[in-house]
Image (spheres, rainbow, N blue to C red):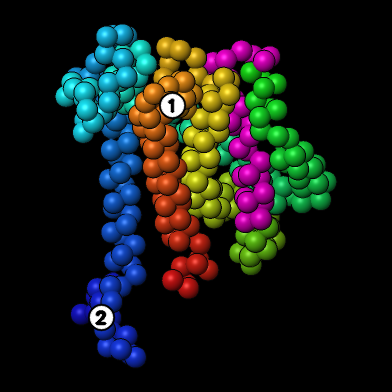
Amino acid sequence: MTESVAVTELVPSTGHRVVAPGRRSRGTEIVLAVIAAFILFVAVIGPLLPLPNPNKQVLTNRLLPPIGWGGAQWKHPLGTDQHGRDMLSRLVAGTRLTVVIAIVSVLLGAVVGSMLGVVAGFRRRATDAVISRLTDAQLALPFILLAIAIVTSRGRSISTIILVLAIVGWAQYVRVVRAETLIVRERPFIKSLRIGGMSDTRIILRHVVPNVSGTVLTLSTLEVGTMILAESAMSFLGLGVVTPDISWGALLATGRETMRDAWWPVALPGLAIVLMVLYVNIAGDVLRARYDVRKRMHR
């Protein structure tokens, strides 16, 4: 019986054995899924872990270094900040809000942008022209200027941050999904359905949307990293999360006050942001390899 996936194969020129691409890809996906589960576990269960109160100030313990540096204490393995608050507790607490802000803003932007992209690509003509011009106008607006305008009018809050990030993100989906819809629209089976009398709404919901969903999932994964960076930028400029709420961007903003005396209050949240963005970019590349037929054929 022939196996569905070959584990190894011989390279004709050298005879060396190499691992089959399918097995490597599957192993990468498992590792990424485990990391995603761990991140979600920390975000959901983190506040229930036996850690110190992330907002409790103990000034006698201010700026304790992490383990491995002189003066460190085991009850604060990642050190403390300028107010004596445990850095590990604050990083864990910040994970929940950072993940929530990124995921909710991505979902809002994906839903709105994907719907507009599908409609623009399928209906064409005046509808396409209007949506495309709105998208161009949105992309032309500087992110920081838009954030300042909305935060000034609505005030600083988590809902305002999510609104700003969703408004910034939806235009990316319009362009990508519109391009995918234009390709799907010209396929023979879509033309057959239209000739057969099926309504445009039914074709879009039952046939176009499933065909572009992989692209939307890939772009959404990549956009999570973009939203985390955008939230960090807002917090760094004083437009983000308000105390006592904690996010990685807020930790980065408060940590800069002690950069000359201690590196860990700013380096640790910065490292968390870098690793998260790196992770979602790798995950997005794996999803793109899975859903992009042309790339999968050339692997």
Magenta stretch, residue numbers:
152-180
Against 64, is 269 above or below? below
Amino acid type for the residue under numbered disc 2: Arg
Q: Which residue is mark 1?
A: 259
Amino acid type for the residue under numbered disc 1: Met
Q: Which residue is mark 2?
A: 17
Main secondary structure found in the magenta portion: helix
Quarter of the image containing the N terminus? bottom left
Residue 142 in the image: state x and y as whole percent. 70, 34
Residue 147 in the image: state x and y as whole percent. 65, 25
Q: Left of 91 or right of it: where is 52? A: left
Within 10 Å of disc 1 (Cα), the crowding (few <14, some 14-19, many 20+) is few
Within 10 Å of disc 2 (Cα), the crowding (few <14, some 14-19, many 20+) is few
Q: Is residue 261 magenta?
A: no
Ranked by sequence position, the earlier of labels 1 and 2 is 2
**Which of pointers 1 and 2 indicates the residue nearer the eye?**
1
> Quick one: SS at disc 2?
strand
Residue positioned most to the right: 126
Q: Residue 133 lies in what quarter of the image?
A: top right
Q: Is residue 159 magenta?
A: yes
> Quick one: SS at disc 1?
loop
> What distance separates the C-alpha of mark 1 from that of mark 2?
51 Å
